[in-house]
Image (cartoon, rainbow, N blue to C red):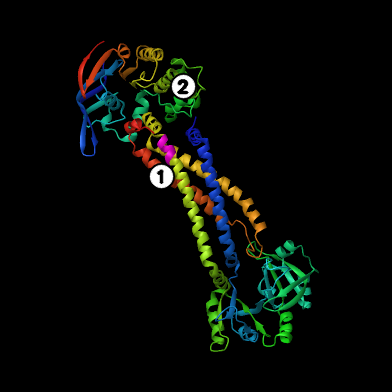
Amino acid sequence: MSEIIQIKNVSKSYWRNSLEIPVLHNITLGVEEGEFLVLMGPSGSGKTTLLNLIAGIDRPSRGELSVAGTDIAKLGESALAKWRSSNVGFVFQFYNLLPVLTAYENVELPLLLTKLSKSEKKKHVETALNIVGLGDRMKHYPKQLSGGQEQRVAIARAIVTDPVILVADEPTGDLDKNSAQEILTLMERLNKEFKKTIVMVTHDQHAAERASRLLHLDKGDLSANGKV
Amino acid sequence: MKIFKLIFKNALRHKLRTTLTILGISIAVIAFGLLRTVVTGWYVGVDAASANRLITRQAVSFIFPLPLSYKAQIEKIQGVTEVSYANWFGGVYKDKSQFFSRMAVDPETYFDIVPEFVVPSQELENFKKERNSCIIGADIAKLYKLKVGDQMSLEGDIYPGMWDFVIAGIYQPKFKTTDAMQMLFHWDYVNERMKVEMPGRENQVGWYVVQVGDPSKSAQISSQIDALFKNSPDETKTETERAFTQGFISAYGSIITSMNVMSWAIVGIILLVLGNTMVMAARERTREYAVLKTLGFSAKHIVGLIFGESMFISCLGGGIGLLLTFPIVAGFAQVIPKGIFPVFQIETITVVLSVGAALLIGVLASIFPIQRALSTKIVDGFRFVG
């Protein structure tokens, strides 16, 4: 299989006033299409930063970064936004649904940027919500859903544009054990059944067990890796 | 779902806050409209001034009279088509709170030279025939429920004694800016009594109203009139009716300036109210904007969301305020003494300024939140704790 994510000698630092704070050191990593990669590591190790770089919501300080055939480090802001809308789906720890929108409208949000007709959008949204098992909760607002259901709506929103890559930042971090298992099962299904490449950051060892590959980050370095 | 729906839902997210903001904008727009109406009410006489009329008055002050004999000399100047005259009478009708203009005029010429006072021809003829008759404006007739044939009595102050008049006619204002709150009667009637009761005050007029054929020659004719009486005991100052009225109003200049300043200060207050609401809303949604950017929404979408919400609130508040301004101004017009503001109504310029102010406020109030939302990086947005 070809590598859908290619990271070569990527470093990332943040600046606080004139003080440089290095976060990632010279990372080189390849992720194959259809892989379910889990990144683990202690807080502050750079997991989320690496995920953000892969997702195109942050830029590397140095190095080359190619995702889905695009050198995203060289894209301008608007081009990068457009690239994100069609290539990457995001799942956040705290769901980040818009509280004023129903489940249906939240899932529909990314489709507002497309030229799909109203009926096509409806079909996409209903399909995504059915995949996550919430076809009967379309008109519910986030506050009317449980945490697990909210996260499933967030996953539906992430897959509604049929992106090639899903990135998930601790998607089970705010859920109880049963809900977390449901979400992980859903992620696993998206990987195996729908062939989505998934990169997931987690602290949860059970979550890591679902992955096809596990990487450890420690103080900005990939310290260990291997198949689970 | 459309972006507009999201704007609408965002605007109504905090219903109480949005309602209070809209209410604040509405009240401010009403106050703005009311103050502007007062200001335009002051200037209505200036706007109504005719371009082809000059006013000749005593050079030292408007309160000093001029000899009647000047009329014949002014009439001889080339370019002058007609000359009339008037005296400020003052006096009290019923009680001192009932204020409206009362003037002694030349019945033969005054209504020719002031055609915006439309008098039925028969009533005008009757007025000219009866020395103790008067013509009143339609608003006076309406206010005091007077009709042709009724009697009006004034208690004189500048011209002491009781003065009884019979209403010979009622004039209608030709334009909406025409003052329909004037009472006009025979200069001769006043003059005859002055001859008997106060010798030395006869044959004096307050000012001349000079009609010119070509308004572009007003300055030249004014100079010619004033030159005629230079070095005489009663030198004159001649100016256009507009300049004369403006000079009259300038006595209240500081009040009008204060009202102008206050009206624009109110616009500033509305800006702060809406600006505060928008800043709070944008700050609360920092994380949501980060989510939207992550989903692929570009800067123009974020700008559209914030700008749209700001405009929605300002236009709704401004619209409600403007709609309410009309009945409120109409209510004020009923309450305030008619003579102070002969015309008290919302002018087009007030509507334009109110709408413009609401739009401008919508734009300005969105600038800072937009700048903040755009300059916040996605990763910083996710870290934001509001």
Using residue B21 as the reference point, say whether residue B118 is left or right of it.
Answer: right
**Residue farthest to the right?**
B149
Q: Nearer the viewer, mark 1 or mark 2?
A: 1
Q: Secondary structure at mark 1?
A: helix
Q: In the rendered image, which quarter contains the C terminus of chain A?
A: top left
Measure the C-alpha gap from mark 1 to mark 2. Answer: 34 Å
In the depicted structure, whether residue B385 falls above or below residue A171: below
**Residue B283 shown in magenta:** yes
Dot 1 corresponds to which residue? B367
User: Which percent across, then down, holds residue B116?
Assistant: 66, 68
Q: Quadrant of residue B300?
A: top left
Using residue B211 as the reference point, say whether residue A148 is left or right of it.
Answer: left
Q: Chain of mark 2?
A: A
The label number, if any, that marks residue A125 in the structure image = 2
In the depicted structure, whether residue B110 falls above or below residue A89: below
Residue B347 seen in this snapshot: yes
| Highlighted magenta segment, given as a residue range | B279-284
The label number, if any, that marks residue B23 in the structure image = none
Q: Is B120 in front, or is B127?
A: B127
What predominant SS class does the magenta segment belong to? Answer: helix
User: Which percent across, then down, holds residue B336?
Assistant: 65, 60
Total labels: the figure holds 2
Q: Chain of mark 1?
A: B
Rate crowding at label 1 as few (under 14), some (14 to 19) or many (20 or more) other CA atoms within 10 Å: some
Using residue A227 as the reference point, say whether residue B190 is left or right of it.
Answer: right
Residue type at tag 2? Val
Residue type at tag 1? Ile
Q: In the rendered image, which quarter contains the N terminus of chain A?
A: top left
Identify the residue at image location x=76%, y=72%: B153
Q: Is B96 in front, or is B279?
A: B96
